[in-house]
Each structure stands twice: as structure tokens, then as C-alpha cells.
Amino acid sequence: MSTPVSTSRTKSRDGASRVQDPEGTKQNIIEVAAQEFALNGLSGARIDEIAAKTRSSKRMIYYYFGSKEGLYVSALENAYRQVREGEAKLDIEGLPPLDALKRLVEFTFDHHHQHEEFIRMVMIENIHHGEFLERSGVIRDLNVTAIGSIEAIYAKGLADGVFRAGLDPLEIHWQISALCFFNVSNRATFSKIFGKDVGSAAYQESLRRQTVEMVLRFVVKAEKLGGV
Amino acid sequence: MSTPVSTSRTKSRDGASRVQDPEGTKQNIIEVAAQEFALNGLSGARIDEIAAKTRSSKRMIYYYFGSKEGLYVSALENAYRQVREGEAKLDIEGLPPLDALKRLVEFTFDHHHQHEEFIRMVMIENIHHGEFLERSGVIRDLNVTAIGSIEAIYAKGLADGVFRAGLDPLEIHWQISALCFFNVSNRATFSKIFGKDVGSAAYQESLRRQTVEMVLRFVVKAEKLGGV
DNA sequence: CAAAGAGTACGAACTAGTTAGTACATTTGC
DNA sequence: GCAAATGTACTAACTAGTTCGTACTCTTTG
């Protein structure tokens, strides 16, 4: 805002210095847009406001994204892509199922906690009944990955005899998501209604532990629940 | 919508017919506003649209509520009041703690399910970081009631030796809320990402059962978990 | 190898339509 | 008669989207 980039000179792949930088401009716009949409919603965000916070201009937003909704969809896709890339970092290969599940829940809890902007985008998208997610196309990529690790863990846990039978991996995923998502999405009203800062480090620590425990107690056979 | 009230003639308490009906007008405006805000958000809702769907006019909205935000706060308060009144119908006095908890979870699940408009209002309020809830005042009334029944149930369950010790009633409430709230709030994106209608009667039935089971398994001592 | 041409990237100012809020006059019920 | 309730018509500000013109980069051609 107060740092006028004297020239938007950047290095392209071949090393030639250039003033024009399409990819950089696009990315910059998307990042600013994501922030604004996450903060104010689709109708609440202002194109002029987004443009002002950009290194670029309103003209460029329409040049690259066509419309406000087009920009919103791009920002949404970008948010999902980022989060999915983050999820890929979770490494639970080779862990025994009980530990793997524990790590998965902890990871999801932390991951959601760290990506509030993404959570808010999903909230907003749900307010819009998911219509932009639907018309986007990135969704196709997401469904396989997200549910994959739980399916693997659950199958292994069943085979090892530590998990109880008859559960649906998708429902387990649903439960984990619910607990971790709500923790970020409803923090404001929850804190205000109960007059307690649910977002404080101490309370988050406690909620994290309880969340892990709740999932494990649900999935793991009672007699196998040792030092959880 | 297709039933045009020929005259806005309503009966007041004393039975006299009158054209003017301040309370009725106010309530009618609030109900329409709640619908519109829940559907489109604070910035997405249009005062002219709300006015058009009312039996009254835009003039009256400003006459009674002062501003768009004033109307929003009133609609929000009304939503909370309604839901709280609904919650009062839950009767678990005298039930053994395990059954009481089960009923409480089932009730919360169903209640959230049936009040999508309220859920959406809370989502929107969270997008706004709960600032309107804060500046409202109705909150004070809510905190005591909402957490009260869980506290009572948990204390009784502890005394009876069926619940495990060391849990925080507020956290139990948080978990139940998370599971029941998410079920309504994130149905759109969840369904679209996994290509499955999570809102279908069959799936809801299953989720309801799993939710109850999850909470009970978390709270109840392992050896007391008989035919849950 | 320089000049012309073509397509992409970008900026400033403008426009048409929308939207929250208001001024003023009028009706209604006591 | 009088205060509360209500209808009509307006406005000032905002906002998504556009127009027109320019600069930069790469390619083609003589």
C-alpha cells in the first residue's frame, strides 16, 4: 500500500528483465481477491477495493478474469489447490493404523486451524449452495485424494483387528471434518455466546486433544484403547 | 407468495378489526428479512427486495428498524429467540443420564436439521466475526440455558458412575454442536465434492445414528456401553 | 539487421444501472 | 385534534463493467 513498486520489473525464465509479468499479475490479483472474498463474501467484496490492493488495476481484473464471479471462482480454485497441496505433505505410510488415524486427525485439526482464509471461502461457498464449486471443475480432482487416506487406514485397521467393523470411511471423514471445520468456522459466535475465547492457545490445545480422542474412541475397538 | 392478502386486516387481541397493525407489520418484516438475509447474506440481501416481499413497504422498514443493519440485527435476534424457544421443548428430566444424553444429541441433530435458516444466519454472522451478535444483547440470555442441560446430565452421569471423569461440559456441547451444525452448514460443498447427496433421508438417518454413537462413546465409560 | 506488423499487457477515465436511505404528504385510530 | 403509521417519489452515492488509447514483446520481412 505504502510501498509503490517503482517498476514491476521481474525476471522471466530466460533471464530477460521485463516490465510486463502476466503470471505474476494474475497471481497477485488472485491472492488479494481471495483475502477480500474470504473477509467480505462474494457480494460484500468490492472490485475497486480489490483492484486498489493489487499491484495491478481493475482493468486487469476484467482482462484476466472477465467478471467478478470469474474472479471469485479463480480465487476459490486457488484456495482449494493450495490446501490440497498442503494435505499432500501428510505422511502416514507405514504407520500402524491407530497412530495413522491419530496423526490424520491432528493434521486435519492443525491444517484447518492454519488456513482460516480457506475455511471462510468454504463457508461463503456453502452460503451460495456450492454453485460456483459446481461450475468450476477443480472438484473432480479433490474427491479421490481427500477420502483416500482414511479408506486405506480404515482397511488396515480392520485387517489388524484394532478398528471395529461396519463403519463408512466417508462418514469418518465427515466427522473429522465437522469437528475441525467447526472449530474455525464458528469460533466467533461460540466465543461470544459463552464468553470464553475458544481460540486461545490453551483452549485450542484442549480441543485438539479431545477431538483426537473422540475420533479414536469412535473407530477403535474398546479393548484396544490403551493410552489414547 | 401466490396468496395475496386482499387486505392486511388482522385481529388484535381485543378483537377489533384494524388496518394498522404495528406488531404484525414488524413481525412480517422480520420474517421476510430473515429469509432474505439467510439466503443472501447481509450485503447480498436487498432492502428493496425485502420490502417487495413484505406486506408493508421500504418506508416501514426504516421507520421501525432504522437501517439495514438494524433490520439484520432484529432478524438475527428473532432467529435466536425462536430457536431457544424450540430448545425449551426438550424434556429429559428424570431420564437416566445415558438416555438423556442420547436424547439431547438426537434432539440437537434434528433441531439443527429443521432450522436451516437459523444455521445460515449463524454462518453469516460468523463471516462477520459475530460483531452484530456482540452489539445485540440477546446473547446474555442464551449462554445459561444452552449449556445448562449438558452440565446437569454430565454431573448426574458422573455420580451414577456411567460417564468418565475429567470432561468439560462446554467441550461436550462444542462437539455436539460441531457435528450437528456442520451437517447443515456444509452439506452443499460436501455433497458436491463427494458426488453424494448427503442430505438424502437415508444418509441423514445414518449420520444421525453415528453422531449419537460418537458422542456416547466419548462420554460414557467403555464398559457401560451396552446396546448403544 | 532494422523496420514494420501483430498480438498481448496495461492504465485512466467514463457509464449505466443499482441501492441504501430520505423528504414530504397523507391516512388511521383514539 | 393529534400522534402514530404509512405511501410516493426522490437522491446521492456507489459499483460492476466498459471504452479508448498506449506501451511492451516477439515475429516477420526486405
Image: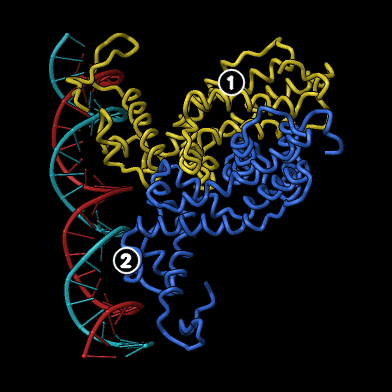
Chain colours: A yellow, B blue, C cyan, D red
Question: Which residue matches tag 1?
Answer: A107
Q: Chain of mark 1?
A: A
Q: Amino acid at mark 2?
A: Tyr
The quadrant of the rendering that contains the N terminus of chain A is top left
Q: Is residue B131 left or right of residue B170?
A: left
Image spot of residue B120 (x, y percent):
52, 50
Place residue A167 in its image quadrant. top right
Question: Which residue matches tag 2?
Answer: B62
Q: Amino acid at mark 1?
A: Phe
- Which structural element holds mark 1? helix
**Residue visible at 51% across and 87% down?**
B15
Q: Residue furthest right?
A: B227
Q: Is residue A44 above or below residue A183?
A: below
Q: Is residue B193 visible?
A: no
**Residue visible at 44% across and 86% down?**
B18
Mark-to-mark CA distance, 1 and 2: 49 Å
On residue B164, which mark appears? Answer: none
Q: Is residue A168 left or right of residue D8?
A: right
Q: Nearer the viewer, residue B13 or B191?
A: B13
